[in-house]
Image: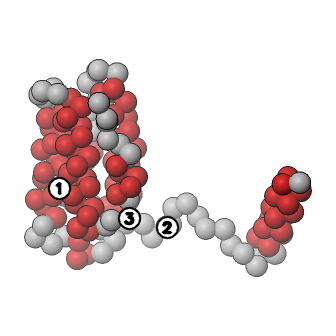
Amino acid sequence: MKAPVFLLALLIYVSAVGYGFVSPQPMLQNDDSELALLMRAMYNDSETIRKAILEKRLPEDFREKFKAIHTATPTDADVRDENFAPFSNGFLLALERIYQNDGDQVQNFNTVVLSCIACHQKYCPGPINKIKKLYIVN
């Protein structure tokens, strides 16, 4: 009984899109800022780092790529206030500890995640729940 209802709803949606009554929302907008795009890439790269740490190996080095956080244009120019540089520097310093293989790598990675959350609490809280999923729980 559920399948016919789903198929009917799907047919109505596809018809509405086809006739222009509904326009599907794109996953990425053309007007995304450099910083927004960088943040999405940083999240994906952080998943790669997380996986490497769980496998007890040194992750691919993303430090140069992540330094673009200092120059990437934000969606809102007001983001680059006096607090942004300390947040971004704290993130990069935490990241550096991972590549120095200094101490507990799980703790080092979780410090990176915490630095992301701290910044997002101030500037853009939307992705915080997603970022929290990067935590490695011992």
**First of labels 3, 1 by sequence position:** 1
Marking on residue 30:
2
How packed is label 3: few (under 14 Cα within 10 Å), some, or many (20 or more)? few
Nearer the viewer's eye, disc 3 or disc 1?
A: 3
Residue 10 is left or right of residue 25, and the answer is right
Residue 86 is left or right of residue 136, and the answer is left
Residue 38, by quadrant, is bottom left
Q: CA distance from mark 2 to mark 1?
A: 25 Å
Task: Give the residue displayed 76% in from the left and 70% down from the top.
Answer: 17
Q: Is residue 68 visible?
A: no
Amino acid type of disc 3? Gly
Q: Position of residue 42 (x, y in %)?
A: 33, 48
Element assignment for label 3:
loop
Q: Position of residue 118 (x, y in %)?
A: 21, 58
Q: Nearer the viewer, residue 116 or 132?
A: 132
**First of labels 2, 3 by sequence position:** 2
Nearer the viewer's eye, disc 2 or disc 3?
A: 3
Q: CA distance from mark 2 to mark 3?
A: 19 Å
Nearer the viewer's eye, disc 2 or disc 1?
A: 1
Amino acid type of disc 2? Asn
Q: Position of residue 112 (x, y in %)?
A: 22, 44
How packed is label 2: few (under 14 Cα within 10 Å), some, or many (20 or more)? few
Residue extending farthest top: 56
Q: Is residue 57 visible?
A: yes
User: Which residue is disc 1 drawn over?
Assistant: 88
Residue 36, by quadrant, is bottom left
Amino acid type of disc 1? Ser
User: Which residue is disc 3 drawn over?
Assistant: 126
